């Protein structure tokens, strides 16, 4: 299995542990990722607030490069990138004016975009292309006894994803269960983390983050699993400020790919787990299981 | 006790504003809003807003431009798309919020002390220059422009990022910046160009 890979800015910066865990996990499962040549920022929510047409052009350059690269799907792990690239694809298909603007812009770079290049999230690929069974077979260190709150956030499941439900998605639940983890019922799984409001309007943004953390603890989770670099940052990096306002809510938040890596027997440092503010306890402390075959 | 009229006067309207917003790509469905309030119920931030999303829909349609563009509502929208998914009339409420943000930035009428529009402009600027975002540099830029005291408050966060190897100070950039600029330049009178 071959995929073009669109890391996005976050996976090269604050969210580098996502890339550090995604790449070995996909390799382990026999999927080859090729980073998109000279990709640019997707624009995220910020650029769209400034200029919608330019935001479309920005995203379309990536789609056009992906189409030029070949027929393989574009793997997009960051939720904001996933949303923006999908949205742009829809806008180009639905609105002739946007199509015209984008075509004209692409032409200056000898690029074209015909609407192929499907944008897909790792959850989608892992669940539908690779499959839970194949994942299960790679598990050498079951996460038995580890209680995980699966947190999806908003922009992967809404409004463009077709691979899972908008409010009650389950693909990550099933993948984590296949690793042997215990899935905690977590009704806030698609509630917004506050996005960039944690930095810009902390009285509202951090409150949202606090509610998510508190609820995961109340449900008995050891760890929150996330699929988005901004969610991970918000849930992990602001604990001292949250503590000051509302009291302690310390629980580690890790990428679901990091948990997959651990179950595949990959070293926690190679998965970027040392980059967390609130570190996850070593697996041996939480779940003393002997590795299979030893 | 001071008695204040909470409803706007007809004279406060800017006739044509609603039409203009509904003319933005993807925003035309606004005309079919039934004011059911599902958007406000789905919104995790409506409890912080001065006008709820439902009220904003009504205000836009009724041409109350100044009230809408000066509201904190459009800047508190975090784009979680809950309202858009739930709207029984298939109104793309999140996209209408974007159209309003664009208008507010263009006319520079956002509320004072609101760092979000500044973040959006700095973000667009960095993309137009480098093609990519280096988050830590963007945030520092934002603090310098909007609230330098926040730098002092966040020193612990900064140290934590350095300690965990996530504080990137080398600019991420693309190779073919000229190509990207030429593409963006084909969109005339863009807000981002103004910002840059």
Image: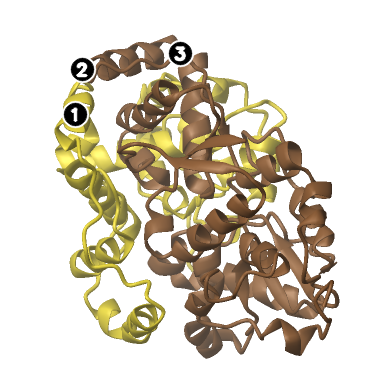
Chain colours: A brown, B yellow
Q: Are marks 1 and 3 in contact (CB under 8 Å)?
A: no
Label placed on residue B179: 1
The one nearer the camera, A94 or A27, is A27
Q: Which chain is indicated by disc 3?
A: A
Inter-mark Cα distance, 2 to 1: 8 Å
Q: Which chain is indicated by disc 1?
A: B
Residue A139 seen: yes
User: What residue does disc 2 label?
Assistant: A108
Q: Where is residue B179 in the image (x, y as percent from the top left)?
A: 19, 29
Identify which residue is drawn at 41% across, 45% down: A44
Q: Are marks 2 and 1 on the same chain?
A: no
Inter-mark Cα distance, 3 to 2: 16 Å
Q: Position of residue A40 (x, y in %)?
A: 32, 40
Q: Is mark 2 on a helix, strand or loop?
A: loop
Q: Which of pointers 3 and 2 lies earlier in the amino acid sequence?
A: 2
Q: Where is residue A18 in the image (x, y as percent from the top left)?
A: 52, 60
Q: Where is residue B132 in the image (x, y as percent from the top left)?
A: 28, 48
User: What residue does disc 3 label?
Assistant: A114
> Mark 2 Cα within 10 Å, few/some/many (few <14, many 20+)?
some
Residue B39 seen: no
Inter-mark Cα distance, 1 to 3: 20 Å
Q: Is mark 1 on a helix, strand or loop?
A: helix
Q: In which quarter of the image is residue A184?
A: bottom right
> Mark 1 Cα within 10 Å, few/some/many (few <14, many 20+)?
some
Q: Are marks 3 and 2 on the same chain?
A: yes
Identify which residue is drawn at 54% across, 75% down: A236
């Amino acid at each position: 299995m071959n995929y073009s890979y669109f890391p996005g800015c976050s996976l090269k910066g604050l969210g580098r542990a996502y890339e550090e865990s995604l790449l070995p996990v996909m390799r382990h499962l026999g999927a080859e990722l090729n980073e998109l040549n000279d990709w640019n920022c997707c624009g995220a929510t910020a650029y769209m607030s400034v200029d919608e047409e330019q935001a479309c052009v920005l995203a379309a350059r990536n789609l056009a490069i992906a189409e030029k690269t070949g027929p393989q799907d574009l793997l997009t792990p960051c939720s904001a990138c996933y949303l923006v690239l999908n949205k742009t694809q829809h806008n180009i298909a639905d609105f002739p004016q946007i199509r015209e603007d984008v075509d004209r812009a692409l032409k200056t770079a000898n690029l074209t975009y015909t609407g192929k290049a499907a944008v897909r999230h790792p959850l989608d690929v892992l669940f539908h292309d690779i499959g839970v069974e194949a994942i299960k077979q790679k598990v050498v260190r079951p996460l038995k006894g580890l209680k995980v709150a699966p947190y999806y956030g908003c922009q992967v499941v809404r409004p463009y994803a077709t691979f899972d439900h908008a409010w009650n998605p389950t693909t990550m639940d099933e993948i984590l269960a296949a690793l042997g983890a215990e899935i905690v019922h977590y009704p806030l799984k698609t509630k917004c983390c506050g996005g960039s409001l944690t930095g810009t309007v902390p009285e509202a943004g951090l409150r949202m983050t606090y509610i998510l953390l508190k609820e995961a603890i109340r449900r008995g989770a050891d760890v929150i699993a996330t699929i988005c670099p901004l969610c991970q940052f918000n849930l992990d990096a602001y604990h001292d400020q949250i503590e000051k306002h509302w009291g302690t809510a310390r629980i580690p938040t890790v990428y679901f790919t990091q948990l997959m890596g651990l179950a595949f027997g990959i070293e926690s440092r190679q998965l970027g787990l040392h980059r967390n503010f609130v570190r996850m306890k070593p697996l041996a402390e939480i779940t003393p299981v002997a590795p299979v075959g030893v | 006790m001071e008695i204040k009229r909470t409803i706007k006067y007809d004279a406060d309207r800017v006739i044509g504003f609603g039409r203009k917003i509904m003319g933005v790509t993807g925003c035309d469905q606004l005309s079919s809003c039934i004011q059911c309030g599902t958007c406000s119920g789905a919104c995790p931030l409506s409890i912080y807003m001065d006008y709820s999303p439902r009220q904003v829909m009504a205000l836009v349609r009724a041409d109350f431009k100044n009230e809408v563009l000066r509201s904190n509502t459009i800047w508190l929208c975090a784009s979680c798309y809950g309202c858009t998914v739930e709207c029984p009339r298939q109104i793309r409420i999140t996209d209408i919020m974007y159209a309003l943000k664009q208008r507010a930035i263009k006319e520079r009428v956002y509320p004072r002390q609101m760092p979000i529009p500044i973040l959006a402009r700095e973000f667009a600027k960095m993309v137009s220059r480098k093609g990519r975002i280096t988050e830590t540099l963007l945030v520092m830029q934002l603090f310098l422009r909007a609230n330098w005291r926040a730098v002092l408050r966040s020193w612990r966060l900064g140290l934590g990022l350095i300690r965990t190897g996530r504080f990137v100070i080398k600019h991420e950039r693309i190779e073919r910046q000229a190509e990207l600029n030429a593409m963006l330049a084909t969109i005339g009178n863009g807000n981002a160009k103004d910002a840059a």
